[in-house]
Image (cartoon, grey):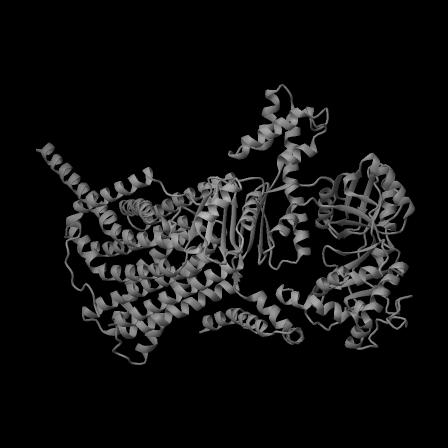
Amino acid sequence: MLFLALSFYFLYPTYKDHQFNEEILKLSNQQDSAAFFDKNGNDVIKARENRIKLGLDLQGGMYVIMEVDIAKLLTDLAKKQDEILTQVLIDAGEQTKNSDDDFVDVVTAKLTERGLSLKAYYGEIRDDDSKIKKDLKTEVENAIDRAIQVVRNRIDQYGVSEPVIQKKGASRLVVELPGVSNVQDVRKLLQGTALLEFKLVIDPQIAVKVMEKINTYLAGGNLDSLMKSDSLKIVAKNDSLKKKDTTNVTKTNIKKDSTSITNKKDSTVNKDISKKDTSKKGPTKKDSGKVTDTNISGLTDSNGNPLDTNKQLSEEEFKIKNPWFYLVRPQQFQDGTVAWFVRETDKQSVIRILERKEIKDLIPTDVSFALSNKSSFVDAGEKIYQFYILKRDPELTGGVVVNARSNIDPTSNSAVVYMEMNSDGAADWARITGANINKQIAIVLDNVVYSAPVVRNKITGGNSQIEGMANIQEAKLLEIVLKAGALPAPLKIIEERTVGPSLGEDSIQKGLYSSLIALLLVALFMMMYYHFAGMVADLALVFNMVFVLGVMASFHATLTLPGIAALILTIGMAVDSNVLIYERIREELTGGKPLRTAIELGYKKAFSAIMDTHVTSIITAVILYQFGTGPIQGFALTLIIGLIVNLFTAIVLTRILFDIMTEKGKTQINFG
Amino acid sequence: MKFFHNLHIDFLGKRYTFYVVSAVLISIGLGVFFTKGITLGIDFAGGTEILVRFQNEIPIDQVRNAMDNAGITGAEIKTMGNEKDILIRTVEQGEGTVVIDKIKETLTKNISNNNFEVLRTDKVGPKIGKELRISAIYATVFSLIAILIYLAFRFEFIYALGAVLGLFHDVLITLGMIAIFHVIFPNLNLELNQGMVAAFLTLIGFSVNDTVIVFDRIRENIKLYKSEEILTVMNRSINTTLSRTIITSGTVFLTVFILLLFGGEVNRTFAFTFTVGVITGTYSSIYVASAFVVDIKSRQKAGKLRSAAKLQVNKA
């Protein structure tokens, strides 16, 4: 009973989601749908998160395996490029096309054939070939990490629900995008080169003016027209439903970016300076976490009155009067700086508003906007992102970055990232940092801000040090980002599969149709052949199906088309177990045993056979799961769950039912 | 209702006849398999494949001409299930996904008044194809080994060997049947893809399932009827489990047959493979797995008798 209740509990969201979808389809005009989402938004999201996940083959979507284009990477890495290298790389490409030989090894061999060594193209003069080879191989591995970061970043911005981005082997990347139909766009998204930029964060006073302009415009009744025209419709389709959460941003634990950037110090020689510097580092750091509760200086609402974030206005009033500040919330810190924050659910709305022509016309041409890569903090279970107002034109682009390295600073024991620039970049960097001391420069990758350190001093020589990261993971991420701009990781698509949504619908329909027919016919046969006991077995069969789907929903397992085949197979196995038991019971009954003993012996004797058959089947399913990909794994997983559940429903559940009956004094049960 | 009650069929007595039947079936099947071959699906062969659905029925020659004009020669073009769904497959890889784009462009340009919708596209690089092939072989071999070990542990080694031999038999027969059906009914679009590998592994699971149930009864009966000949015990076991065998195989057959009929194009390869597998899996439990054990056991016994006789002769 408990299991059954649990299964229904886990399956309920699936049913609910289905219901919501039907209701959404029924809603024709937008007023209705807006009202519907206002009312049910939360429930719809929840149901969607907890339903049984459908595989790409069932709901349509895109499955891509990409591989780091090692030949291209090696071309980029080479000290000099000439015809020999190009030819060698092409040859190596041909040779590795159908073999498992390591690309770097092949290149080395080919160079040796020509009487050259790796040293001619890579590494330092004093390095020997084996070290260079090792370094190159590490570069290949690092490249995939960068690629993953870049791809994840872009997919998040594109707004795909439930994407899967996975590293596979040393140089491959698997991307699964359910529900995506615009193949061309996505492909560009996946393969384009990452753009790293250093952009100046605009002076808060100017930023405030810009934001006020937008706010005033939107408060003048323009928000509705902007939102209504397309966004709600898209929202309804995109899973990214707007959650109407009325909690305000609580004013505790707010963390804005508190990193700073300085000249790189040689920690062994200048220990003192380094120490002094870190202790002095940033009032920002000290102040993060505390927000002044007073009016934000100079910021006015749409009526020109000073903006008050204290709750003098109710949430709704505030929203109507200051729609933009409702979406992008200003917070002032004790040091006088203002930071802006956007809730995750509002992200898409904010981006969409900023893309409108009317808004673009409002803002100065040299201003652009970007969001932080990760949530600055979490409020009431919701991620909050920092919103940056930046100079449109980058001060520098990532091409000048030669190297980046994350480390733990031995003196301060905190995470730091060292960044090295080439000589051209270093000269510009010195000028830029010199002119912007105590201002923030944002490190932007594909229009997402990864860090916005405060410039502490003029950085000459091209070696910078970024500090203030929360931990080494954060520093590592920044290192990857800096390198992604410096050394792109070229990717090529080696496998791509797309399934259109209509094929998925077709398949679901046919799969469910045949499962149901199978279930019905089998159930009918069992009743005819075993009479009352057959009905008990049928009951167990229904429970089995409910349990399997329940377990899948609770594990967030994916149902694929072969998974439906596995369900049908589970029906077969479930029936088999009951047949085995019933045949035994019949034998015992024919032998003249009383009902209770016959049942007991039947179950006991059939047990070893049932156990052995299930174990062997589970073994093959596990192996299948290990070696298969995508849909096939779905088959194996569904089968494994089905077999384990069946051990319970066929052996335990039916037994309990029979025991209850015999306990109640029944001496006759019709086994046909 | 009862089927097959109180049967006393001498199944294993006729085993030599069925050895011949199996051998003939396997040779014909494999003969066709090796001469005609079966289509390697895109998963294993690599290449580019696109399935489109046209608004209206379309003569396949029109599509073929369009492709030829665009210089995509040697593409395999066929209908899938109905005259609107067209599958185009080519071994060409191209960089990235240029081939798919080219095909789509060609169809848009050359076939007017008949819009199409892309149902599915697949591009598999040669390396991936090879890797999938290798993992399919690994999967099959490893599951056979795993089953051999488990059964050797639960029964005797001879039984485990017999069961695995039965599995080989099933895989070979099914492979042959697929080859034969592929030649006779090319419209079934049977091809060796990942789905078929899944079907083979499931078939292995099912077949060993059936064998285990017979063996389980033999294990039990050998203890009960110690004085009886092994052949008699085994025949008795097969007879008593026959009713279960028929019911189970019948219901499983029914379910996969329904999948074959109504499951659509995508599940067809799986369903067909498994439908054949259910029949041969049931048959092999008796005439390969059990028969093998009988032959080995009686030979062992004969050997023992002979050595015992020899021993007596020596003593004398």
Quadrant occupied by the C terminus of chain A:
bottom left
Residue located 86% across and 71% down the image: A302
- Left-right relation of A480 to A50: right
Percent position (x, y) of residue B25?
25, 44
| Viewer can see residue A272 | no
Percent position (x, y) of residue B42?
46, 45
Percent position (x, y) of residue A588?
22, 68
Residue B176 vs A358, above or below: the answer is above
Percent position (x, y) of residue A94?
55, 31
Quadrant occupied by the N terminus of chain A:
bottom left
Along the line of sight, the residue nearer the viewer: A92 or A100: A92
Residue located 28% across and 79% down the image: A666
Along the line of sight, the residue nearer the viewer: A609 or B201: B201
- Left-right relation of A314 to A231: right
Determine which quarter of the picture holds residue A495. Answer: top right
**Residue sticking out furthest to the top:** A115
Residue located 68% across and 70% down the image: A243
